[in-house]
Image (cartoon, grey):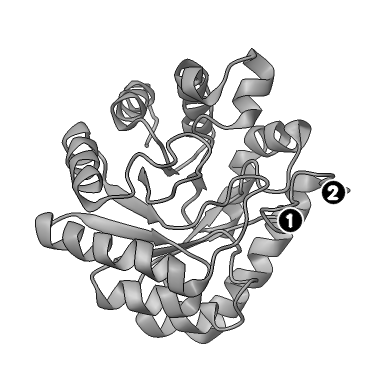
Amino acid sequence: MGILNLTPDSFFDGGRFEKPDSALRQTEIMLQEGATIIDLGAMSSRPGSDEISEVEEAQRLLPVLEALVAAFPEAIFSVDTYRSNIATEAADRGAAIINDISGGTYDDAMLATVAQLGIPYVMMHLQGKPKTMQEQPEYAHVTEEVMLFFARQLEKLRLLGAKDVVVDPGFGFGKDLAHNYQLLQDLPQFQILESPVLVGVSRKSMINKVLGTRPETALNGTTAAHTIALMKGANMLRVHDVKEAVQAIKIVGALPSTTV
C-alpha cells in the first residue's frame, strides 16, 4: 500500500503531493514500482497534528481522487479517513477501500457505513487523538488490549454484515517505543483474529529513536522493520517507499515454506 499524502503537514512528505499533477506523477511511480493499493490521505494524523474540518478534507481529497481514478482506472485506491460522510463520497468517486485510523470510534456511523458500502475496511487501533496521543500512552498489557479492541470491533462489523476487514495495530498511534516493539514482537498473535494484518511503520519515530535517524534518513531502518513484520505474518505494508518494500517482500517470500 503506497502512501499518497495530500496534506501540507504530514511528518515525512507534507506538501509534496497536494496538487493533482504531483499526485498523478507520484501515483504513476508507485504503481510502476509495484504498489498494489494507493492510500490517499487528506488530513495529517501525525503526533501533535490538528484536526481539519470535513469541508476542507473533502476539498483536498475528492478532486484528486477523481483525477486519479480517471487516469488509472485499473488501480485500487484506498482513502484514509475516519469520517463516514467522506467515506461515502470517496466510494461514490471510485475508492475501493476505507482506511480508518480510529477503527470506527471517532464517527458512530462509520461501521454501519462501510458495511452498507460493502467495500473492504482497514480498522486501525489508536489510543487518544492525534493531537495528544503521544504525550503519555499507557497500557497494562498493550498486545492484549489492542487485540481485545479488534475483537470487539470485528464483532460489531460482523453483526452489521461487513466483510473484508483488515486490522492495523497502529504503530506510533498512542504507543511509546516499548509498546511499538512489543506489538511487533507479538504480531503472530493477531492471526487469531482471522483478518489480514496491515503494518504501517514507514519512517516512523519507533525507527528513528532506535537508530538516531530522521524521517528523511530512515529508509534502511524501515526496510529492516518491514522484514521483521513480514516474517512475523504481516499481510500488507503501508509504505512511503514502494520499490524497497517490494524488494523486502520478495526476499522474505523466497524463504522456504514462507507465504507473503
Q: Position of residue 183 (x, y in %)?
A: 68, 39
Looking at this view, is 146 or 170 the one in front?
Answer: 170
Picture coordinates of residue 7, whole percent (x, y)? 43, 50
Residue 162 appears in the rendering? no
Q: Is there a contact, CB below 8 Å, between mark 2 and mark 1?
A: yes
| Numbered tag placed on residue 197 in the rendering | none
- From the viewer's perspective, is 107 left or right of 77? right
Q: Amino acid at mark 2?
A: Tyr
At which x and y percent is residue 199? 51, 42
Rendered residue at 64%/62% (across/down): 150
Which residue has dot 1 on it?
127
Nearer to us: label 2 or label 1: 1
Closer to the camera in the image, 94 or 119: 94
Residue 27, position as x, y percentages in the image: 23, 44
The relative height of residue 15 versus residue 127 in the rendered view (above or below) is above
Q: Is residue 51 visible?
A: yes
- Give above or below for 37 relative to 219: below
**Residue drawn 38% across the image and 79% down it:** 88
Q: Residue drawn at (55%, 64%), measured in percent from left and top?
A: 52
Q: Quadrant of the N terminus?
A: top left
| Mark 2 crowd level (few <14, some 14–19, many ≥20, 10 Å Cα) | some
Dot 2: element = loop
**Amino acid type indicated by mark 1:** Gln
Q: Is residue 81 found left or right of 208 in the rendered image?
A: left
Q: Is residue 15 left or right of residue 108?
A: left
Circle 1 packing at 10 Å, graded few (<14), some (14-19), many (20+), is: some
For the C terminus, the quadrant is: top left
Return the residue at label 2.
139
Q: CA distance from mark 2 to mark 1?
A: 10 Å
